[in-house]
Amino acid sequence: MRRSVYNEDHQAFRETVRDFIAKEVVPVHPEWEEAGHAPREFYLKLGELGVFGIEVPEEYGGAGIGGFKYQAVITEELMRAGVSFGGSGVHTGLVLPYLLSYATEEQKRRWLPGFVSGELMTAIAMTEPGTGSDLAGIRTSATLSEDGTHYVLNGAKTFITGGMLADLVLVVARTSPAGQNRREGLSILCVDTRSDGYTVGRKLDKIGLRSSDTAELSFSDVRVPVENLLGQEGRAFEYLTSNLVQERLGIAVSAYAAAAAAVEFALAYVRDRKVFGRAVAEFQNTKFVLADCATEVEAAEAMVDRALDLAEADELTVADAAKVKLFCTETAGRVIDKCLQLHGGYGYMLEYPIARLYTDNRVFRIYGGTSEVMKSVIAKSMGL
């Protein structure tokens, strides 16, 4: 079906991104996967391309173009090529909305120019070793000094995407004891990774997303200036909740695009591969499987496009985002599995992009809220 969600500017941007990926990423991506992250200097290239500054106002060095559709275009092109931009998706997809919404004018002038250029890479640290979906259970603490000039941060975080190379990390910490409402008393502190007591621990060894670094972080009496408090003290849970809509939309776009790419990879393979003297594509089972997959992808695409339009109009609700994430991630899981099966044994080899899609895709049903959490959100919106 013909898509109408993107305009001519989006399509021109798509061609630029596609060319950049072909020249700057595809040839070296296996090296990034081996290293476990993209090289730090690559992010400067993304800055030069303008990827980091699309939504950043012009006065801070960006293009000042609102909306999520340009980021969606980038995601679709990365999946189409079977590669990634390392851990930079968190930089723009997760961290930027917090900076734009809650940073003071002084903070924006201090951080956003470097953010746009790629000289200042960011990450966000929410999850702790004993705290996953239950953010209200965060134990990392930040105590205000007696003279009121800084916080003293102590604790640990895990599963932090981009944590190995980040220059500034948004750390969610408890600044006051939890009362009857455990969601109160949490704040976001922007921590300079050069600070004394800030330590990057293990680079975690994941089954997928191999070119995106994921790390453990620890804080031992880290001094964080009060000027680095993001937004108001004690309101972090509210801030985190408000940004979940875009985060979940971004995951849905990734899942849909991965499923669409899987179908294309499978089509190319079955047309070329011969079994019993015939192309695999000639077998009825192959045709039926791919027909099912193509139909599921079209349905996911329709949901994504509708969600992108709603987000552009600032009308995408928490329940809407949960529905699109749930549907697209579960659909991608089914489609990619079927497409890998059509590759036979070669589908299990990492040299084939379908194998990487298979392992990369699995986490889509976990992070940003598990499928089970999405069902709970949807059921609540139904009055259940």
Image (spheres, rainbow, N blue to C red):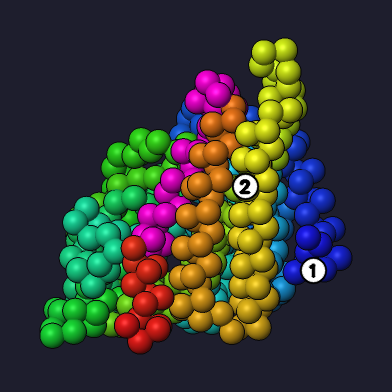
Q: Residue at x 63, y 79 (%)?
A: 310
The residue wearing badge 2 is: 293
10 Å crowding of disc 1: few (<14), some (14-19), many (20+): few
Location of the N terminus by quadrant is bottom right
In this rendering, the answer to whether 152 lies above or below 78 is below
Q: Is residue 33 visible?
A: yes
Location of the C terminus by quadrant is bottom left
Type of residue at label 2? Cys
Q: Toward the viewer: 242 or 339?
A: 339
**Residue 250 badge:** none
- Picture coordinates of residue 357, whole percent (x, y): 54, 39
Q: Residue at x 55, y 33 (%)?
A: 340
In this rendering, the answer to whether 139 lies above or below 47 is below
Q: Toward the viewer: 116 or 269?
A: 269
Q: Toward the viewer: 120 or 162?
A: 162
From the viewer's perspective, is 212 left or right of 374?
A: right
**Dot 1: what SS?**
loop
Question: Which circle's residue, 1 or 2, is located before the other in the chain?
Answer: 1
Q: Is residue 107 visible?
A: no
From the viewer's perspective, is 77 left or right of 29?
A: right
**Dot 2: what SS?**
helix
Q: Nearer the viewer, mark 1 or mark 2?
A: 2
Q: Which residues are magenta?
A: 344-371
10 Å crowding of disc 2: few (<14), some (14-19), many (20+): many
The residue most toward the front is 284
From the viewer's perspective, is 243 left or right of 69?
A: left
The residue most toward the top is 277
- Picture coordinates of residue 221, whole percent (x, y): 19, 60
- Picture coordinates of residue 74, whole percent (x, y): 67, 54
User: Is residue 138 within the magenta segment?
Assistant: no
**Residue 4 badge:** 1
From the viewer's perspective, is 14 left or right of 259?
A: right
